[in-house]
Amino acid sequence: MKKTLSQYDQVIETCRQLFVKKMSDYNTSWRIMRPKSLTDQIYIKAQRIKSIEEKGTQKVDDDIRSDFIGIVNYGIIALIQLELTDPEPIEMDPDQALLAYNNQVDKARKLLQAKNHDYGEAWRSMRISSYTDLILMKIFRTKQIEDRKGKTIVSEGVEANYLDMINYAVFALIKIDIKE
């Protein structure tokens, strides 16, 4: 578990650095996006990954690694947006945005620890394409919950699905970035 957490932290730091750099370029323009739009943005990234996995080729130079990083960051942004129910102000203090980012990372990391305790290191035996499929499934579940205005009977809510998407994307990035 110690190894997994160390690798998790390495991958998250890469994602966090990109988030900070983009905030330098665009500030917190993402604040204008509604959670539904963020779900769709994650869908675009995951669908592109699946398409490249299936075709074995790509025409745009961005590698799938950058799409998994996008899934992590858009998932975290979606969680932040769910907590900040007031769409105003669009501009957010960068330190406040980074604190909100780190708070969501802490939630995802704690969930990883709990699930990894129960499932062991099963994720290490999975293929990256399985993470892609699981992310897509979580996206479709999230869309259904969003379309029902958050109402579920027995299912986890939108937040739990975003947390799982983040963690599956981190698993893929560990496999891509950290060769063992």
Image (tube, rainbow, N blue to C red):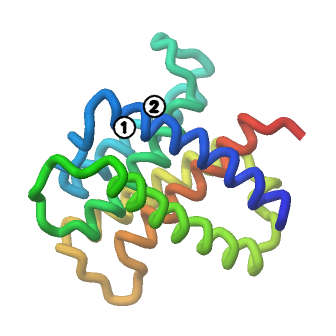
Q: Is residue 173 left or right of residue 97?
A: right
Left or right, residue 127 beside residue 165:
right
Residue type, mark 2 in image = Arg
**SS of the residue at dot 2?**
helix
Amino acid type, mark 1: Ile
**Vertical arrangement, residue 161 with respect to residue 27, above or below:** below
Q: Residues within 10 Å of mark 1 (few under 14, many from 20)?
A: some
- Where residue 48 is drawn, which disc sits there? 2
Q: Residue shown at 75%/42% (left/top)? A: 175
154 to 131, vertically: above or below = below
| Left or right: residue 170 compared with residue 150 | right
Front in this rendered view, residue 12 or 65: 12
Residue 107 is at least partly visible in this image = yes
Q: Nearer the viewer, residue 69 or 103?
A: 103
Quarter of the view holding residue 179 = top right
Along the viewing direction, whichever of 17 and 75 lies nearer the viewer: 17
- Would you say 90 lies left or right of 6 here? left
Q: Position of residue 8 (x, y in %)?
A: 69, 54
Spot occupied by residue 162 in the image (x, y as percentages of width and height): 43, 62
Relative to 25, residue 20 above or below? below
User: Could you tell me if the residues under marks 1 and 2 are in contact, i.e. CB atoms within 8 Å?
Assistant: yes
Image quadrant containing the C terminus: top right
Q: Residue 148 occupies which quadrant of the picture? A: bottom left
Q: Kindly identify the residue that appears in the image at 29 percent across and 46 percent down.
A: 40
The answer to whether residue 128 of the structure is visible from this angle is no
Label 1 belongs to which residue?
Answer: 44
> How far is the residue under mark 1 from the one under mark 2?
6 Å
